[in-house]
Image (cartoon, helix red, strand yellow):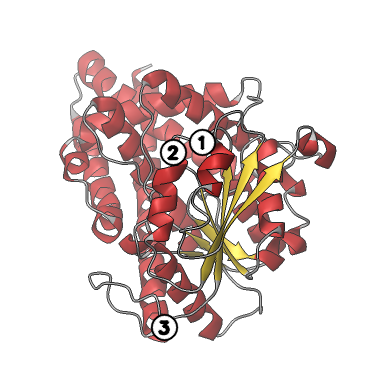
Amino acid sequence: MSTVWLVALVSSALVQCLGWAWVGIGLRRVREGAAEAATLAGSPTSGEAPDGAADGVPISVVVAARDEADRLPALLDALAAQTHRPFEVVVVDDRSTDATAQRVTWRTTDFPVPLRLVSVAEGAPEAAGLPPKKHALERGAEATSFDRLAFTDADGRPGPGWLATLARVAAADARAPQETDAGAVLVGYGPMGREAGWLNRFARYETVQTAALAAAGIGWGRPWHAVGRNLSYPSALLDRLGGFGHSAGSLSGDDDLLVQEVARTGAAPVRYVWDARAAVPSPAPSDWRAFWRQKRRHASAGTHYPVGVLVALGLFHTANLVLWVSVPVVHLALGQPIGWGLLAGKLILQRSVVADVLDGLGDEPDLRLWQPVLDALSAVYHAVLAVLGALPTPTRW
């Protein structure tokens, strides 16, 4: 038994260190690609204010909303403050029972750019054979005027340089040598807003860690994850993919399953937007019930991931749990303190890799301070999440 625990300890530490080294190399590739894109676009550095007139790529912003009357006004204010031109906003009211539609119509007269409302009738998603949100997004895309689409959610709070930064990256990608003439899928960062409390701190930590893994996958040419509140691609891409039919069996996944399908079919290149100005924050869940409800919905898409992605993620997160469990067991039961050194080495490597995300996309000092505690919680969290993903799929988005 002692040999089993020692093997588990060393093996899990090795898997975690190799995994984080893989992430670190992937992030370096993303940063190098971002630097090349900035050169091609003649972009200012991330510390300078973006200029919306620099790249006049027309953009259509699509927002799918269901019973979002309370959150839409803040999003519309954030979109009205965008420095980029030209752009338009299309809000899809997906059978709301509150004042969602009125919140949009009230703003149409004084909004600085075209603002349109698309309404979804009862029974329309079922008739189309799509989950409600994916049907709403397709309807919104059909109502747009411009080729470049940008998607966000009602709880998104993009900064004024969001669209200007997306336009720069899209313009730079168009100038770069390509194997295909298809416009790129742009995956952006979606941090959680900072508030007091451990729930908020843990939610932000998981968001940063997931962003690191997602960006690294793109850096390696293996995109597997994206966030729906910060995603952009050409309207022609949906036609090329046949809409969201590829993921019609999953309530969620209009983001990660889409980029996986793009990678599988080679329909377009996928880029990670490594620029803090393009981040789209959103409020963290207000309580643990809301947190787990949100994560269960997200986890439902995981059952549709490619086997290779599931195996890699499962091995990575299982190794982290085994490492945290085996370190005290080996020390207390076998009198071997070596595990603490292995754990410390893993945490140092992980910290240096995650620091790249915090340095490049928005610093959060408390996450650096509490990293060991948060990582131990993360190990347990992912074990619970795996169980949630196997439960019956939620039916409401």
235 w.r.t. 10: above or below: below
How far across and down, in percent of the image, does residue 119 sit?
A: 68, 44
Q: Are marks 3 and 2 in contact (CB under 8 Å)?
A: no
Between residue 261 and residue 162, name the one nearer to us.
162
Q: Residue drawn at (40%, 82%), measured in percent from left and top?
A: 54
User: Which residue matches tag 2?
Assistant: 71
Q: CA distance from mark 2 to mark 1?
A: 5 Å
How far across and down, in percent of the image, does residue 75 sit?
A: 43, 48
User: Which residue matches tag 1?
Assistant: 68
The quarter of the picture where the N terminus appears is top left
**Callout 2 environment at 10 Å: few (<14), some (14 to 19), or many (20+)?**
some
**Earlier sequence position, callout 3 versus callout 1:** 3
The three-letter amino acid code for the residue at tag 2 is Arg
How far across and down, in percent of the image, does residue 181 sit?
A: 66, 79
Q: Residue drawn at (38%, 29%), measured in percent from left and top?
A: 285
Between residue 115 and residue 332, name the one nearer to us.
115
